[in-house]
Image: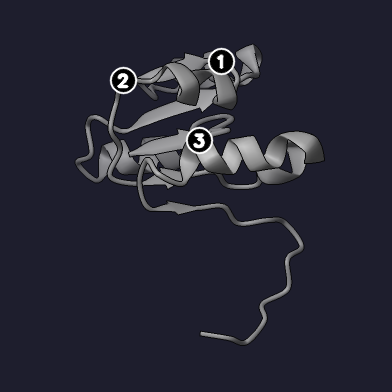
Amino acid sequence: MLGLGCGYGEFVYFLQREGYAGAMGVDCNAQEVEVARELGVTNLHCVEAHEFLRGSLHEFDFISAIDVLEHIPKSEVPEFLDLVRPTAPWTIPLPGAQPTGIL
């Protein structure tokens, strides 16, 4: 499992505590990654999501990108989705997004 834009690693930490020892996080903010490591989160990488996905040899069972998409320039969103889409099931929730009521 992979957390893109993991920040302080809350979701990665949760996964690791639930037994997913191979859960991995990626964030480009070195300070947040360092704090996460100090708090005991392991398997973190300080790198841009695009760069990580392009060079990753890993296969993931699931990818989360919680509150990430709004930080990606509009012109780069198609490439980001192309890198994520074929890799694994994923979720990309957006802050402030209103539910549509469609299930």
User: Relative to residue 86, is residue 69 drawn left or right?
Assistant: right
Helix, strand, or loop for circle 2? loop
The residue labelled by disc 2 is 57
The residue labelled by disc 1 is 47
Q: Earlier in the sequence, mark 2 or mark 3?
A: 2
What amino acid is labelled 1 in the image?
Val
Position of residue 71 relative to residue 35, above or below, is below
Name the residue located 28 percent from the left edge and 33 percent from the top edge: 59
Give the alpha-carbon distance from disc 2 to disc 3, as whole Å. 12 Å
Residue 64 image offset from top left, x and y in percent: 47, 45
What amino acid is labelled 3 in the image?
Leu
The front one of 50 and 46 is: 50
Q: Residues within 10 Å of mark 3 (few under 14, many from 20)?
A: some
What amino acid is labelled 2 in the image?
Leu
- Identify the image quadrant of residue 99: bottom right
Q: Earlier in the sequence, mark 1 or mark 3?
A: 1
Position of residue 15 relative to residue 50, above or below, is below
Q: Which mark is residue 8?
A: none
Residue 41 image offset from top left, x and y in percent: 39, 25
Position of residue 23 relative to residue 56, above or below, is below
Q: Residues within 10 Å of mark 1 (few under 14, many from 20)?
A: some
The front one of 58 and 40 is: 58
Name the residue located 37 percent from the left edge and 43 percent from the top edge: 14
User: Relative to residue 46, is residue 99 drawn left or right?
Assistant: right
Residue 77 image offset from top left, x and y in percent: 69, 41
Q: Quadrant of the N terminus?
A: top left
Helix, strand, or loop for circle 3? helix
Q: Residues within 10 Å of mark 2 (few under 14, many from 20)?
A: few
Residue 76 image offset from top left, x and y in percent: 72, 34
- Identify the image quadrant of residue 35: top right
Q: Which mark is residue 83?
A: 3
